[in-house]
Image (tube, grey):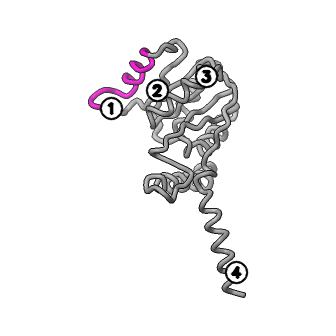
């Protein structure tokens, strides 16, 4: 009897663990006043935002770029602006300079950019594993806006079968630690 309980408990734990990555992902973009591309990844996230812009999901895109970061001696905000200037949609895409080094802190900088646009409904674009936590943070920190989220998929970085690739496992574990920290500590500050 005791052995069967252990086996059942083990099967439940394995079943829940197998869904750990899937739980992190929310991909439910809604028509909005603006799209915000969260800082961090610079290829897949902007591409997803531009695709949403072209689909008419929002009239403007804000591309978050960290003010203090440099790549090969060039400020990231300057590189982001050159990228924006090269786009056919350049008049609809704006660089949003951020100083926050966490999603929590980034929300304050995003608020300043959104106020200048008069936005009320906002579509966040971020890496798929980051979507649930990002949406939770922005909804909590900026309740004056309605947030939806779109996942930018990158199979080199993350996948649902997280146990099958070392990088996917690391990203899944890291995001779960951040999610638990948000729920246990940061959300109550």
* Mark carried by residue 70: 1
Q: Residues within 10 Å of mark 1 (few under 14, many from 20)?
A: few
User: Residue 137 is drawn in which quadrant?
Assistant: top right
Among numbered discs 1 and 3, the one appearing first in the sequence: 1
In the rendered image, the vertical position of residue 104 relative to residue 50, given as above or below: below
- Judging from the image, what secondary structure is the residue with disc 4 in? helix
Viewer-proximal residue among 162 and 122? 162
What's the magenta region?
A: 72-86
- Residue depicted at 54% across the width and 36% down the height: 152
Q: Which residue is mark 2?
A: 97
Q: Nearer the viewer, mark 1 or mark 3?
A: 1
Q: Which residue is mark 4?
A: 5
**Where's residue 93, x and y in %?**
52, 18
In the rendered image, the vertical position of residue 70 relative to residue 136, given as above or below: above
Q: Is residue 80 magenta?
A: yes
Gap between marks 2 and 3 measured at Cα = 14 Å
Among numbered discs 4 and 3, the one appearing first in the sequence: 4
Residue projecting furthest to the right: 1
Contact (CB < 8 A) between labels 1 and 2? no
Gap between marks 4 and 2 measured at Cα = 54 Å
Among numbered discs 1 and 4, the one appearing first in the sequence: 4
Residue 40 is left or right of residue 119, and the answer is left
- Residue depicted at 56% across the width and 22% down the height: 61
Contact (CB < 8 A) between labels 2 and 3? no
- Which SS type dominates the magenta stretch? helix
Gap between marks 4 and 3 measured at Cα = 56 Å
Q: Nearer the viewer, mark 1 or mark 4?
A: 4
* Mark carried by residue 115: 3
Residue 185 is left or right of residue 30, and the answer is left
Gap between marks 1 and 3 measured at Cα = 27 Å
């Amino acid at each position: 009897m005791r052995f069967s309980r252990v086996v059942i408990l083990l099967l439940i734990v394995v079943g829940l663990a197998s869904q750990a990555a899937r739980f992190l992902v929310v991909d439910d973009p809604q028509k909005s006043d603006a799209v915000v591309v969260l800082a961090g990844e610079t290829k897949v996230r902007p591409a997803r935002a531009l695709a949403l812009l072209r689909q008419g999901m929002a009239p403007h895109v804000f591309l978050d770029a960290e003010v203090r970061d440099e790549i090969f001696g060039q400020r990231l905000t300057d590189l982001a602006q050159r990228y924006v200037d090269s786009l056919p949609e350049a008049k609809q895409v704006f660089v949003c300079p951020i100083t926050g080094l966490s999603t929590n802190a980034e929300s304050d900088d995003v608020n300043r950019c959104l106020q200048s646009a008069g936005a009320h409904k906002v579509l966040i674009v971020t890496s798929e594993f980051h979507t649930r936590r990002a949406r939770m943070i922005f909804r909590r920190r900026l309740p004056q806006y309605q947030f939806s989220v779109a996942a930018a998929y990158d199979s080199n970085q993350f996948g649902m079968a997280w146990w099958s690739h070392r990088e996917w496992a690391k990203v899944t574990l890291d995001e779960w630690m951040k999610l638990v920290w948000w729920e246990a500590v940061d959300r109550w500050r």
